[in-house]
Amino acid sequence: MIAAAGVADSDNAGTVAFVVATAFESRCVQRGLKAVARANAACIRCGIGCHRKDALLKLSRFQCIVSTGFAAGLQHSAATGTLLIPGRIQGIDGKFRNASPEWHARIRDVLEGFQPLSSKPLIHVDEIVATPGAKRALGADGKLAGADMESALIADACEAQGIPFVTMRVVLDPVDATVPDAISAGAVNGTEPRALELLAALARRPGDLHNAFIFAGYIMKARQILTQAISQVTGALAASAHT
């Protein structure tokens, strides 16, 4: 676990925990938490596809678990920076996991000012959805807003431990965007691509450079929205705890 906002790991019982996949997402959460005085929250990094399963074993000390980070957009309405707060997550088994109605409504109310915002379901995928064709196929019926690789698994862990769960994701790559091979190749088998590895991959695939520059723009926008959303939710929770 990564304690956040000056809150010691051993003192986090009874707070909200934001669960992310990558170190980059964790840094976004940390920045959002540090902007809030008396932020009583924690950040847990579970790895891409929740490959760090031990991180999800001791969630019962928290009031609520928020699966957060980035997602792929599956609809044209889910552009980069769109905030996704789904009421349901479709697992790879086809079954839906429901967010806690109380916490879903609470967090959505806090973030209502963020636009665009969607409460359409997300779908769990076991690999990066890298091409426009693959994204369009997943979102063909118009019912799913985005895809990620962790939320359904985090929801299952929460259900097993009796903890309320909600997802708050930001669209990174829109439906018509292709994820550069240098990025998607670095996220195989739950591994997180590092800067030097990405540079080496781009050197081997110079054709990816144009896409990589476009993707960097997506990252900057999505990072800003995620940090702002974390700060706003944490600030609201901190204010309600001290009133």
Image (spheres, helix red, strand yellow):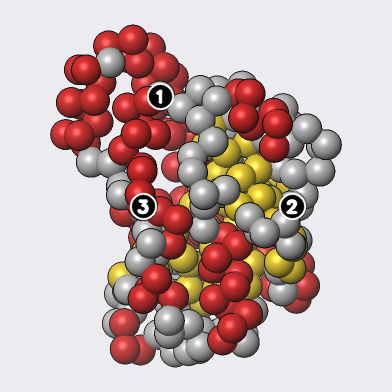
Alpha-carbon span between mark 3 and mark 1? 17 Å
Query: Which residue is found at the position 66% from the left and 50% from the top?
Result: 123
Q: Earlier in the sequence, mark 2 or mark 1?
A: 2
- Give above or below for 165 relative to 24: below
Residue under label 1:
180
Q: Can see residue 166?
A: yes
Residue under label 2:
121
Query: Which residue is found at the position 62% from the left and 87% from the top?
Result: 162
Q: Find residue 71 and report its horizontal and vertical position in percent.
A: 55, 44
Q: Can see residue 240?
A: no
Nearest to the eye among marks 3 and 2: give it: 3
Query: Which residue is found at the position 52% from the left and 58% from the top?
Result: 150
> Disc 1 residue type?
Pro
- Badge 2 crowding class, 10 Å Cα cut-off, few under 14, some 14 to 19, many 20 or more, is many
Q: Find residue 64 and report its horizontal and vertical position in percent.
A: 58, 78
- Badge 3 crowding class, 10 Å Cα cut-off, few under 14, some 14 to 19, many 20 or more, is some
The answer to which of 201 and 235 lies nearer the viewer is 201
> Disc 3 residue type?
Gly
Q: Find residue 174 and report its horizontal and vertical position in percent.
A: 60, 29
Label annotation for residue 190: 3
Tag 1's secondary structure?
A: loop
